Image (cartoon, grey):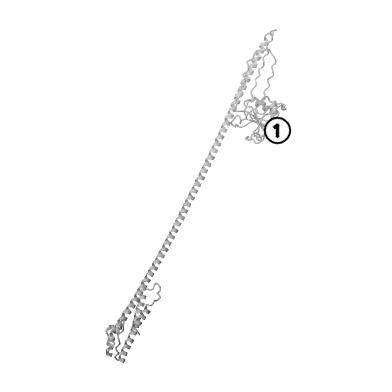
Amino acid sequence: MNVRTTISGARRRHSSPRRRPAVGVRTGTYLASAAASLVLATALIGSEVAPRADAVGAGAASAGPAPSAPAPSGSGSVAGQLGIGTTTAPDDVADRLEPLQELAASRSSREEAAAVAGLAQAAADQAALDQQRAEADAAARRAAEEAAGMKAAAAMAAAEEAEAGMKAAAAMAAAEAEAGMEAAAAMAAAEEAEAGMKAAAAMAAAEEAEAEMKAAAAMAAAEAEAGMKAAAAMAAAEAEAGMKAAAAFAAAEEAAAARPVAPAAAPPAPAPVTVAAPAPRASAMPTPRAPAPPAPPTPRAPAPPAPPAPRAPAPLAAAVPAPSVVPAAAPVAARGVARITNNAGAVRPQVQAAANAVVSNVPGAGSIRLGGTRPSAADPGGHPSGLALDYMVMSNRALGDAITAYHIANWNELGVAYIIWEQRYLSSPGGAWKQMANRGSVTANHFDHVHVNYR
């Protein structure tokens, strides 16, 4: 067996590529594998060199001296390189073979050391690669762990931020709700206070109005009482003055009768003086009419006294019964058409007919304004429905008395329901005038117009 070939085969066997161990095998495993390979190579080389040497020695002894041969060309044999001749005696074979054995052993040792060194280098390289892979794997694991930690930290931070945002939003919503409740409570308190103030103001206004009405009523009653007392005093004075005038007139007549009468001409008869007491009116606003002072008597021839001049019936005071004898009915024939001012349609036909009779039979009634329909009136059965008229006499009280007397005298013929004149109310021709409350103005108290409601 050729030692070089055997060693080369062993080198090729030991240096043939092997499957790399799995990642993570320890460096000690590779070192142990290299040592085992070195021991195996040593055993193989030793087993091959020893039989060859024995065979060479035995052949040399049996064959005797070998013939000399020419030196090989080229590089030469090993024996030539060592200076050993080819025609050596058999006794010197062992001595001459020893350097060859040493050379073979030295070469085998070098090749074995080279093989072991190669295996060790390969094991070291593999160990370095494995270590690099392990370090790379460890770095990858650390990077993965760090990335996972960073992701976990980011997730935790996001969760904490979201939780903080939710808490802040909840706190803001609670604050807004509380502020809204406080604002609503304040608004409700303000509205309640405002309502209380309005109610208090309304109550105060009502109490003030009631007090004013009571004061006005008391003042009106006092003025009415004072007016009645003044009228009674004036009537008494007028009556006394009339009586004195009548007595003086009678004395003058007696004196004239005692004197002789001249035949030429008789003195004119004196006109009798008629004193009429004014009827009291329950009104605080107009002033009572002042009676005219009686004229001084003049001596005249005796003549029969003239009857007193007729007067239109004056309206009666409150709670004073109307005269039991109703004035005689006047004619109700209409000779003209009354002009009525309407603001909400025409009046009823019976109202128009009554107005025509009034302006035709009461002197002066055709020259005044007559108010008919209007929606703003407070009596739904009067002006708004066309069943009422206002005879606007203004300051002409005599005309108002005449219109009132005409309606009383023709109550049923004209279809009268009730009359309001100078703050009094009359609901039947034979009834009593009723005093009305003070409404605050001349027009509201019916001092400038006669209000007549028709059926």
Q: Determine the image quadrant of residue 155.
A: bottom left
Q: Position of residue 259 (x, y in %)?
A: 67, 9
The correct choice, above or below, for 141 with respect to 98 in the image is: above
Q: Determine the image quadrant of residue 444.
A: top right
The correct choice, above or below, for 85 with respect to 385 in the image is: below
Q: Position of residue 260 (x, y in %)?
A: 68, 8
Q: Secondary structure at mark 1?
A: helix
The correct choice, above or below, for 16 with respect to 396 in the image is: below
Residue wearing tag 1: 349
The correct choice, above or below, for 445 with respect to 16 in the image is: above
- For the question of whether residue 451 can be seen, the reply is no
Judged from this view, the residue extending furthest toward the top is 263
Quarter that holds the C terminus: top right
- Tell whether 232 sits left or right of 94: right
Quarter that holds the N terminus: bottom left
State the residue in front, 370 or 140: 140
State the residue in front, 402 or 71: 71
- For the question of whether residue 136 can be seen, the reply is yes
Q: Residues within 10 Å of mark 1 (few under 14, many from 20)?
A: few
| Amino acid type of the residue tagged 1 in the rendering | Pro
